[in-house]
Image (spheres, rainbow, N blue to C red):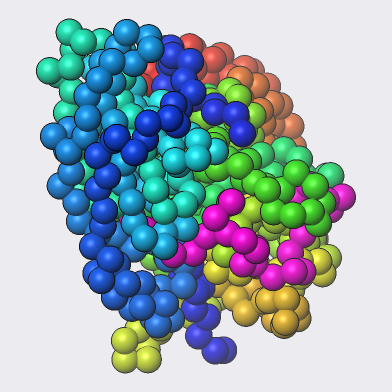
């Protein structure tokens, strides 16, 4: 089998709590200090990324920066708070995002980042969004210019800390900066009729950026406690945690990035997002990464916790929900049974050897396709349970019969060198033995019932628990939800 290279292969909805109403003032921006990136260095990095076939999931390149509060301008905002502003410019950029080496925002200080046209405002970022001792990565704004604006009570101004580590220059566009969609025309918008039976699962899927420079897909997943623990599943080859640059803290999750009209002009909003996560478990050979997001997604994002099936039953039909080439969310369907394929090589080494082989479900699409950027997206069986995570494949609009390969969740369930590094430890933390779990909305506790039924035969039995045991587990889950910090 050939080697598969799939290694990439509006209204502000605030993140902070107790946020002040904010509308960017676009008058007088020329008086704000303008800081520019090193254009020759940026161009050289872009050429290198474009020429490297292993960099296809990269959408931005970074340039080091030590800009700080001393490089901006302080004045007084209309609300009486001290206001600090600075402009950043990178010639030709289709988007900008920022890595902060230091960011301290004493409550109720708030930071916003927006494009100079005021079309996309990210933030407010506040103390609750930050993890002490780590870098912080912002969501992106489109275009080649951005304004960083901070508000703080005058008495607390001395306690603010802000220093950049890197400015990331987007050379592949998203949103308004991308004049046309990059993904193939056979992709199917999730708002189209094919998505009608999968509205919950669609809400669980998201686009992620890693290190402000790379893009993948993933999904929020349920656990047997059903306690709204914000567990997020993607692919190991997406590279989360491979270096400081791509640490789990660098992950930004974009919810509901999708078109509003079936087959319409791409018009997805990038405003619903959250920054930061912790790496819980991953495994190279089963190609999964499980993250815990720093906060539960805001209620306004209307997310969904996807169900899963690790029984190993062969899925006879189902869908994948993903962000091809990082574009708006799309859905693909398969109507013939998947096949079990072990040892599929999805990544070549420098010497032409296989650097990563994965135990997979092989699927051939009856509708839609996947692309680079779809990596990490889920494969759902006909019973609406996740059974795999996209590792690689050859499917495309020009070759719709080529198969795709999803790392099997059943193979990943107990993969890893230690118990707490396994998927099972976090999706079934009480060791209930459940092998199939339904999805749910936030705040709900759904009846496990049976194990999801047969979806093509084969495989082991499920793990429905006695009603009394389930009742105790659900009561404990409700207590944990009530007491868990959202910081």
Whether residue 144 appears in this view of the structure is yes
Range of residues picked out in magenta: 168-195
96 part of magenta stretch: no
Q: Is residue 148 above or below residue 361?
A: above
Determine the residue positioned at 39% across, 48% down: 145
Where residue 365 appears, x then y in whole percent?
76, 70
Where residue 287 appears, x then y in whole percent?
46, 63
- In the picture, residue 356 is in which quadrant? bottom left
Q: Is residue 250 above or below residue 239?
A: above
Where residue 335 appears, x then y in whole percent?
83, 65
The answer to whether residue 123 is left or right of residue 164 is right
Determine the residue positioned at 28% across, 15% down: 76
Whether residue 339 appears in this view of the structure is no
Determine the residue positioned at 27% across, 44% down: 34
Instruction: Tell me which secondary structure the magenta stretch mostly adopts.
Output: loop
- In the picture, residue 396 is in which quadrant? bottom right
193 part of magenta stretch: yes
Determine the residue positioned at 73% across, 76% down: 397
Say which quadrant the N terminus sits in.
bottom right
> Which residue is nearer to you in this view: 141 or 360?
141
Say which quadrant the C terminus sits in.
top left
The answer to whether residue 302 is left or right of residue 426 is right
> Which residue is nearer to you in this view: 393 or 27?
27
The answer to whether residue 467 is left or right of residue 64 is right
> Which residue is nearer to you in this view: 228 or 330?
330
Q: Is residue 467 above or below residue 167?
A: above
Where residue 4 appears, x then y in whole percent?
52, 80
């Amino acid at each position: 089998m050939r080697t598969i290279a799939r290694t990439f292969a509006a209204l502000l909805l605030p993140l902070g709590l107790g946020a002040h109403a904010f509308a960017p003032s676009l008058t007088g921006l020329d008086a704000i200090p303008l800081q520019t990136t090193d254009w020759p260095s940026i161009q050289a990095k872009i050429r290198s990324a474009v020429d490297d076939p292993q960099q296809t999931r990269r959408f931005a390149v970074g340039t080091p920066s030590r800009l700080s509060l001393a490089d901006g301008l302080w004045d007084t905002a209309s609300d009486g708070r001290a206001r600090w502003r600075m402009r950043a410019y990178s010639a030709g950029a289709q988007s900008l995002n920022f890595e902060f080496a230091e960011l301290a925002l004493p409550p109720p200080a708030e930071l916003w980042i927006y494009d100079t046209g005021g079309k996309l405002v990210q933030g407010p970022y506040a103390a609750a969004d930050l993890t002490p001792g780590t870098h912080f990565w912002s969501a992106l704004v489109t275009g080649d210019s951005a304004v960083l604006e901070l508000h703080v009570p005058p008495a607390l101004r001395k306690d603010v800390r802000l220093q950049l580590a890197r400015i990331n220059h987007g050379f592949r566009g998203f949103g308004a900066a991308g004049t046309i969609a990059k993904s193939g025309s056979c992709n199917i918008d999730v708002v189209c009729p094919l998505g009608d039976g999968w509205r919950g699962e669609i809400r669980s899927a998201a686009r992620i950026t890693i290190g402000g420079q790379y893009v993948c897909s993933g999904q929020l997943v349920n656990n047997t406690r059903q306690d709204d623990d914000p567990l997020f599943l993607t692919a190991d080859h997406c590279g989360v945690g491979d270096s400081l640059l791509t640490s789990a803290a660098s992950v930004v999750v974009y919810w509901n990035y999708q078109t509003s009209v079936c087959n319409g002009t791409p018009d997805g909003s990038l405003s619903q997002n959250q920054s930061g996560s912790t790496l819980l478990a991953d495994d190279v050979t089963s190609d999964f990464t499980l993250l815990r997001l720093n906060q539960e997604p805001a209620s306004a994002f209307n997310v969904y916790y996807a169900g899963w099936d690790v029984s190993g039953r062969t899925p006879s039909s189902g869908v994948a929900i993903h962000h091809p080439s990082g574009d708006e969310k799309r859905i693909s369907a398969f109507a013939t049974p998947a096949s079990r394929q072990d040892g599929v090589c999805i990544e070549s080494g420098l010497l032409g050897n296989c650097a990563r082989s994965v135990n997979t479900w092989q699927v051939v699409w009856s509708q839609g396709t996947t692309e680079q950027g779809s990596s990490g997206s889920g494969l759902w069986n006909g019973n609406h349970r996740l059974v795999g995570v996209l590792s690689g494949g050859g499917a495309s609009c020009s070759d719709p019969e080529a198969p795709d390969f999803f790392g099997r969740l059943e193979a990943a369930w107990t993969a890893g060198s230690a118990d707490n590094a396994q998927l099972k430890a976090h999706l079934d933390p009480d060791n209930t033995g459940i092998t199939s779990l339904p999805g749910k909305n936030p705040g709900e506790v759904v009846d496990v019932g049976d194990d999801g039924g047969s979806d093509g035969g084969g495989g082991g039995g499920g793990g429905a628990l006695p009603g009394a045991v389930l009742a105790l587990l659900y009561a404990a889950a409700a207590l944990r939800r009530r007491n868990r910090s959202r910081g």
